[in-house]
Structures are given as C-alpha cells and as structure tokens.
C-alpha cells in the first residue's frame, strides 16, 4: 500500500498530504503505486491518454497492470500530477518520463477463478473514473493486457484487452444504434469480441441491435459497478473471460 506524502502545489505553494488510492488486482489484492516523497508535483496543463496510466505490479501475485497516474486537485484550481517512485525493474512507475506499457503483452486470456473475489468498484466522478471502472471490471472478469484501443471511436473512449474491444461512453446521452454498430464493426475488423459500457443507458433500438449482433451491454452506475443490461452481459458477468 502507498504511504502518505507531502505534495506542494507549484502554483499557490499550498502543502497537501496525499495517499494514492488502491485498486483491486485480479487476484483481489489492493494495489497502489509507490509515491516518491522527494519528487516534485507537476501541474496538469493538457491531457494525453498515454500519460494517464502507469504500470503497477501486485506484490501478492506478481501481475503488472495499468492504473491511473496519481493526481490531486488543489483548492486553487490546479490539478497536480503526483510523482511516483521508480521500480527496480525500470518499468512504468515513473512520474514524468513517458507512458506506461501494458503488462503480459501477447498472453492468452485466462478464465476467471471458479470462486471470484467480490468485485470492488471504483467510484465514478469523472469520465476518467468511468474508464478506470470499466478497466477494473474487465480485469476482475479475467481479461489481461488492458490498454487503449488502437482505433479511436467516434465518441467515447475505446479500451482493449487480448481478444476483446470495449467502448466506454461517459456522456449523459443514451448510446445510440450507430454507437453499438460502430463498436461491433470495429471489433469484427480486429477479430475480437466486444462489450459496451455506458453511463446513461441505451436507446431501445440500440439494445435490440446489440442482441442481434451479440454485444454485451452494461450500464455503469456512479458507484462504478457495471450493471448488465442484456442477457449477453449477464452471461459475461457470470462466466468471466474465456
């Protein structure tokens, strides 16, 4: 688990005590990045997907996964990127020196354990949280190598695992028939299965089309728990990755 460190805002010079949040590994162990107590926090002035994630290794099972980089909101309005410690392997736990790479690249998907641990959701407050919640859920199902999708969808955010393409829609409008069809077509070009996560639900024709195309649909509630919308999603939730 991460220890608390003192973080100074470079804009207003306020001092903050910060502890990195922990996210559940697929094995169920809470995992948090090790913070660098001597590093300097940076103000986030622009966003790039590759800078949003770092590789963190679980001390219990040894699996390395991508987690959101630690950030802190200062009362002055500045978003601070909190520095993390380098690992002995020189992997992605560095604060400011490049993007994280997914773990276990090229590995085969694994079935979820017969008796899975209780799912630990990630509370959703921002669009970034919605992506994190979907990624944590997919890892809980047993998918590996969670990463940004190679092709950017017309709306929302695409993430991928080995053999799976997922669409996360953090907007406040229900997903449309076109949204579902675009995901399915993209997954077909990549010979992958697909799954859709939406915060605002689905239009009736989108749900009907998803059943025809074989697309599992989930709604993300604000606790970060994906709720199955169709029978395909019920089946995926029950059986996990295959």
Image (spheres, rainbow, N blue to C red):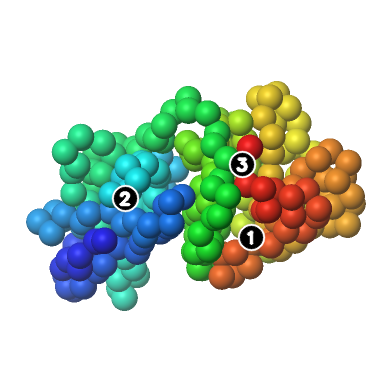
Question: Which one is in front, 117 or 237?
Answer: 117
The residue where tag 1 is placed is 226
The picture places residue 55, in percent across and down from the top left corner, at 34, 42
Q: Earlier in the sequence, mark 2 or mark 3?
A: 2
First along the sequence among labels 2 and 1: 2
Mark 3 lies on residue:
241
Kindly report which numbered mark, 2 or 1, lies closer to the viewer in this rendering.
2
Tell me: residue 42, above or below residue 184: below
Cα–Cα gap, marks 1 and 3: 15 Å
Relative horizontal placement of residue 221, taking residue 51 as reference (left or right): right
The image shows residue 95 at horizontal and vertical percentages of 24, 47
Q: Residue at x 48, y 25 (%)?
A: 106
Separation of disc 2 and disc 3 at Cα?
A: 21 Å
Mark 1 and mark 3 lie on one chain; the one further toward the N terminus is 1
Q: Which mark is residue 60?
A: 2
- Asked if residue 166 is positioned above or below residue 223 in the image, the reply reads above
Question: How many residues crowd around disc 2 within 10 Å: few (fewer than 14), some, or many (20 or more)?
Answer: few
Q: Residue at x 53, y 61 (%)?
A: 119
From the image, state whether disc 1 or disc 3 is nearer to you: 3
Query: Which residue is most to the front?
Result: 114
Q: Nearer the viewer, residue 158 or 113?
A: 113
* Residue 12 visible here: no
Task: Give the Cα distance between marks 2 and 1.
Answer: 26 Å
79, 112: nearer the viewer:
112
Q: Left or right: where does residue 146 sit relative to residue 8?
A: right
């Amino acid at each position: 688990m991460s220890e608390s460190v003192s973080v100074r805002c470079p804009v207003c010079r306020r001092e903050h005590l910060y502890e990195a949040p922990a996210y559940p590994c697929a094995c169920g162990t809470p995992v948090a990045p090790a913070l660098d107590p001597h590093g300097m926090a940076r103000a986030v002035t622009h966003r790039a997907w590759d800078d949003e994630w770092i590789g963190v290794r679980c001390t219990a099972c040894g699996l390395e996964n991508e987690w959101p980089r630690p950030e802190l909101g200062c009362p002055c309005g500045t978003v601070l990127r909190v520095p993390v410690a380098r690992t002995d392997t020189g992997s992605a736990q560095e604060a400011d020196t490049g993007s994280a790479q997914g773990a276990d690249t090229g590995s085969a998907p694994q079935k979820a354990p017969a008796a899975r641990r209780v799912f630990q959701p990630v509370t959703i407050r921002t669009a970034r949280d919605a992506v994190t919640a979907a990624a944590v859920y997919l890892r809980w199902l047993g998918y590996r190598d969670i990463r940004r999708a190679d092709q950017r969808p017309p709306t929302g955010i695409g993430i991928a695992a080995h053999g799976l393409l997922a669409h996360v829609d953090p907007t406040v409008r229900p997903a449309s028939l076109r949204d579902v069809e675009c995901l399915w077509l993209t997954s077909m070009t990549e010979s992958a299965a697909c799954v859709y996560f939406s915060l605002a639900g689905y239009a009736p024709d989108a749900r009907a089309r998803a059943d025809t195309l074989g697309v599992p649909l989930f709604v993300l509630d604000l606790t970060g728990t994906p709720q199955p919308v169709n029978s395909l999603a019920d089946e995926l939730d029950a059986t996990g990755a295959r």
